[in-house]
Image (tube, grey):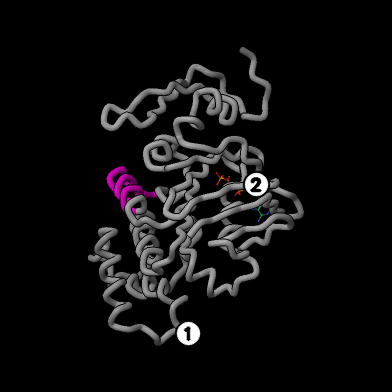
Amino acid sequence: MNVVLDRVSVAVGGRTVVHEASLRVESGRFLGLVGPNGSGKSTLLRALYRVLRPHTGTVRLAGDDAWRLPPREVARRVAVLTQESGTDFDLDVLDVVLLGRLPHHGGFGGDSARDLALVRRALERVGASALADRPFAALSGGERQRVLLARALVQESQVLVLDEPTNHLDIAFQLELMRLVGGLGVTTVAALHDLNLAAAHCDEIAVLRDGRVTALGPPDDVLTPEVIHDVFGVRAHLLRHPVGGRPLIAFSDDTPVVTPHQEHTP
Ligand SMILES: Nc1ncnc2c1ncn2[C@@H]1O[C@H](COP(=O)(O)OP(=O)(O)OP(=O)(O)O)[C@@H](O)[C@H]1O
C-alpha cells in the first residue's frame, strides 16, 4: 500500500509546524524521517495516521484520502508505534497486544483463537513471551516498547508508522526491531534520531527542518556531511560500514555548539 503526502501543512496550538510537506513511499518501502528536535516529525506522522487534520494538502493511503476514510478503515490500514502509546493501560500485556486486533472486530469480546495465536506469536517475535501475564504498567520502558511493537504487528496492517521506535531499547533490540520491521514487507514511515540506524535500514530518508522537507532520497544521497551540518549544525564524516558498505556517519565534537538556525562562522 503506497503512502502519499501532497503539500501537507499542519498547525498545532495555532501555529503551522509542518509546511507543505510532500512525500511518496511506495508499497513495502521504508522511509526514515529525520530532523532536529521540534522540526515537525511527530506532527507530520500524526497527520499520516489521522490524528491531526492537515489544514491544507492530502494524505493518501493506496490512493484514498485518509481523512475521508472511516477511522476504523485507517486503523486497519495503518499500525502506529509512538512514544505516547498508552503508558497508562491498566491491563495485562496479553490484553494490551490484543487491542491491536480491535480494528478487525466490532469491539471487546471478539477475541478468537486466531487472535490469541497472533498475539502469542507477536510476543514471541519481539522477545516478550515471558511478559504475557504481567501488568503493562509495571514494565520497563524497553519492555513496553516491545509489547507495543507486538500490538502493532497483530494489527496486520499494510502501513506501519513508528515514532522514535528505538527509544528505550538496548542496542541488540534496536537492531532486532529495525531488522524485524524491514522484513515485514509493509510500507513503513519512521521518525528516527539515530542517523546511522536510518542509513542502515531505510530505503529512503526525508529530512525535516522547521517543518519543511529539505532533502529526500536514498540515504547515500541525503545523509551527506553537508546536509547534516546544514540541518543539525554538527560536523559529520561519511564512512562505509565494513560489512555491506552502507553509509556510516561519524560525528566530531570540534564544532561549536550551535542551533541549526544560527549563522555558522567558518
Ligand atoms: N500540542 C502542541 N501544542 C503546541 N505546540 C506543539 C504541540 N505539539 C507540538 N508542538 C510544537 O510543534 C513543533 C513540532 O513538534 P514535533 O513534536 O512535531 O517535532 P519533532 O520533530 O517530532 O520533535 P522531537 O524530535 O523533539 O520529538 C515544536 O515546535 C513543538 O513545540
Residue 138 in view in this figure = no
Taking 233 as reference, is 126 above or below it?
Answer: below
The residue that disc 2 covers is 21
Q: Earlier in the sequence, mark 1 or mark 2?
A: 2
Helix, strand or loop for the magenta stretch, by majority: helix
Residue 144 in view in this figure = yes
Residue 172 sits inside the magenta stretch: yes
Say which of marks 1 and 2 sits in front: 2
Residue 208 location (% of width, % of height): 59, 40
Residue 255 sits inside the magenta stretch: no
Instruction: Pick out the residue farthest to the front.
Output: 63
- Secondary structure at badge 2 equals strand
Instruction: Pick out the residue farthest to the top.
Output: 266
How much space separates mark 1 and mark 2, taking CA atoms? Answer: 35 Å
Amino acid type, residue under disc 2 in the picture: Ala
Residue 245 location (% of width, % of height): 32, 29
Image mark for residue 106 = 1
Residue 21 location (% of width, % of height): 65, 46
Taking 221 as reference, is 265 above or below it?
Answer: above
Task: Please provide the residue range marked out in magenta.
Answer: 168-180
